Structures are given as C-alpha cells and as structure tokens.
Amino acid sequence: MRFLILTCLFTSCLLAERPNVVVIMTDDQGTLDLNSYGAKDLFTPNFDRMAENGVRFKQFYVGSSVCSPSRATLLTGKSPPGAGLTGNSGKTGGLDTSQVTIAEMLKPEGYATAHIGKWHLGKDQGRRPENQGFDYTFGHMEGCIDNYSHFFYWSGPNYHDLWENGEEVFEDGYFFQDSLVEKARNFIYEKKDQPFFIYFAINLPHYPLQPDAKWLEHYADLPSPRKNYAACVSTVDEKVGQLIGVLESAGELENTLVIFLSDHGHSVEERTMWGGGYAGPYRGSKFGFFEGGLRVPAIVMGPGVAKGVVIHNSAMSMDLFPTIADYCGVSKMPSGVEGSSLRSMLEGKDKQLRDTLYWNMKNERWAVRHGPWKLLFNPRDDTKVYPKLDPKKDRYFLANLEIDNTEGTNLVRKFPEKAWELIEVYKGWKHALPIEPLKL
C-alpha cells in the first residue's frame, strides 16, 4: 500500500510538471494582420502582449492555403497528403480516424483534451472531434456558421450546426465568440488539477464578417471591407485576451504553452466583400501558394520560451505537433510525423530546421521552396494586384524571395536552370505529384 501511495504521488508530480497547451487558430487572418506584424490601422493589444512575452515568427508557413488541410497539418504533424486530406472536408469526407491527432497523442500522457470552435475536418459521425481524442468538444463541424443563429449558410437548404459532445445544442441569438470563451473557462477550471490541451479554433475573421458592434464603431472611419475585417480581428484579439485572463485567474498561465497561428492567408472571396485582409508586400491570398496564402502570423509564449524574440528562420505548422510532444515529455512519437520540434527556436537559438518546404493541393497545384528560391506549378492569385497570370507562360512560376519578396515577376525564363533544379528537388519529395514538363 505504501509503495502504491508513493507511486501515485510520484505520478501526480510528473503530471503537475508538464505544461498545459493551448493552441489558438484563427480563420482567414492575413499575413500581417496584427499590430506587431506591421499593420498600422489595427488595435490588437492582447496579441501584441503575447509577442512581447514570447517569440514571433517572421517566416511561418502553414501546410495549405485552404482550411481543412491546414488544420489537418496542425493536428497531425504531417503535410496534407501525409494526413490524407489535401482539400476541404466537405467533398473529401474529412480526416481519417487512423490519423493520430495532438489530442490522441496527449491523452495517454494524462492530459484532458478539448476542442472548442471550428472543426471542418469531417461532419459525419465517426469523423468528428470526439472520434479524434477530444474529451470535450463544442463548436461547428462545417467551414463557417452565422455567429448568432449558428446555421451553416454556404448553400441552401441552410441547416443548424452547433454541437457539444456529439449532441446538437441551441444557443439562438447568443454570440458564438462569447460561447467559445465561456466553454474554455469551464473546461480550464474543471481540469486545472491535471494537465490539459485545448484546441481553441476561432472562426473569425472568416466570413460572415460579424464582429462585436463596438469594434465597428472603433473602426468607423476605415473604408469597407477593411472596417468590417478589422473589427473582426479586434473581436478575436479581445476574446484571446479573455482566454489568457482565464488562464491567469486560474493560476495556470505560467505553466501553459500558448501557441497562436492563422490557418492561412486572408480571403478575397465575394462573401468577405472581396477583401479586407492585409499581406503587405506579399502576393496572393487564400487558395493560392504565393506568400500571401501560406505565410501567416504565429506567436508562441510559455514556460521556457524566450521573451520578445523575433525568429527570422522558416518554420511550418507541422512542426507544432513534435514541439508540443517535446515540451510535454511524450514518451512515444506517433509514426509518420513529418515536422520537427521548434524547441531550440522557441528558447532563443533561432536554429534553421530545414532548407526546403513543400506544398500541394489535390491534383491542381504544387509549390516548393529551396533556400530563397520558390517554384509554383499552376499558380493562383485572386487578389488582382498584379497582372493576370497567363495559363501558359505562367504554368511554372519562379520567384526569389531575397531578390523580390513580392513574387511580382516570373523569373522562370531568366533562370530556367534554377527552375529545373527545383523541379528535381520537388520530385524527391515522397508526396510529389506527377510532373508536367516545363516548356519555355
């Protein structure tokens, strides 16, 4: 009996020493859409305080420029093809339950796990968050909902999409962003005696652009759609501040690894009034593999993480899975993880993890970055800032991010040997799509 008691005490101490983890993912937030990233017209004090008390990445890339595969990359530590999801889940069914998520990795380590917010990795029974290791789940399964009626409204007939622990729940007229904070607060206070993991997936500034009304007043002098979009960003900032305040009041902030990132670049779709987001010099937006679609704001703070440090070397969202495993002392890493731990970067060493980055989306487009050089196949740019891409001349698009970080000019005819080199680099990736010949 005495041995059993000592064993239990030892196990409790080990669990107490492990950090909590909160991953905050926003939806369609532009590359530079934070004050700390250079946006001059935004008010984002809570995100900026995170940057002051943690590390901020200058070259952080997501696995895809569309929602579902980007989320799959985050939760599995794999590229979209590695996770088996290269397009949005509405057409592909969603993330297969054979894939191991962060939640499934941490549960055997004694963690309580929660998904709060947007899922978009499968709406059918068997592909929902409760099937992927989450003890508690609250939110919507599809890509977007109205924040007050909680109806999915992409195409008719519209239908209600709000769920808690697998059961449909109704909160008609209640602001979804307030619900997210309340559910997180309840979970934190209920589980604070054991380590916990929260995937806090905010559905803004994705359309519909429905901010708190006070923020529309704050940005009244900005033109539309920037006004509406900016009000959504400040609404998100306020809710993130409230979430961090809950961690602090519960006495958990000092022992919590807080990770923030956007799922991809800003949208210029009709439903977001053709824009509103800000990518600065970076070309492109959601759906495309130019920098404005893939490079996102990302901040990490927590125990052992350096404070006020800017990381200039590149990292990817797939790296967060092994980073969390590293900090949480996971005993066995799931097979197939493609990312690498960012711990040395987060502790201020700014170590370069990789020189090559890869992307592909279904069978439509792919891209590879090797050093400063980047090659895109079948590029897409919906922003209309630059001349329209020529389907033939721009079938392959070559850029050098040191020479011109705007990717404004196709260098493929000026440096064809570099294009051939990057094609060979891409062909070496285990998930490479079939290569179409480069014709100059």
Image (cartoon, rainbow, N blue to C red):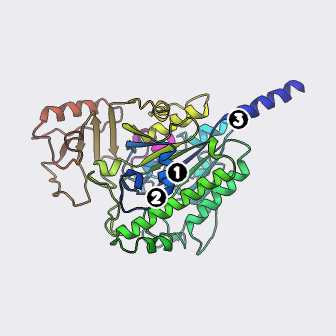
Amino acid on which the number 3 mark rests in the picture: Leu
Question: In 3D space, how far apart are the residues under numbered discs 1 and 3 (Cα atoms)?
Answer: 23 Å
Residue at x 58%, y 51% (from the top left corner)? 129
- Earlier along the polypeptide chain: callout 2 or callout 3? 3
Task: Answer few, some or many: residues within 10 Å of disc 2's Cα (few below 14, many 20 plus, some between 14 and 19).
Answer: many
Secondary structure, mark 1, is strand
Residue that carries the numbered disc 3 in the rendered image: 15
Residue that carries the numbered disc 1 in the rendered image: 24
Which region shows up in magenta?
73-86
Q: Can residue 124 be seen in this view?
A: no
- Earlier along the polypeptide chain: callout 2 or callout 1? 1
Residue that carries the numbered disc 2 in the rendered image: 44
Which quarter of the image is occupied by the N terminus? top right
Residue situated furthest top in the rendering: 3
Which of the two marks, 2 or 1, is nearer to us in this view? 2
Location of residue 426 by image quarter: top left
- Earlier along the polypeptide chain: callout 1 or callout 3? 3
In terms of depth relative to the viewer, which is nearer, 397 or 408?
408
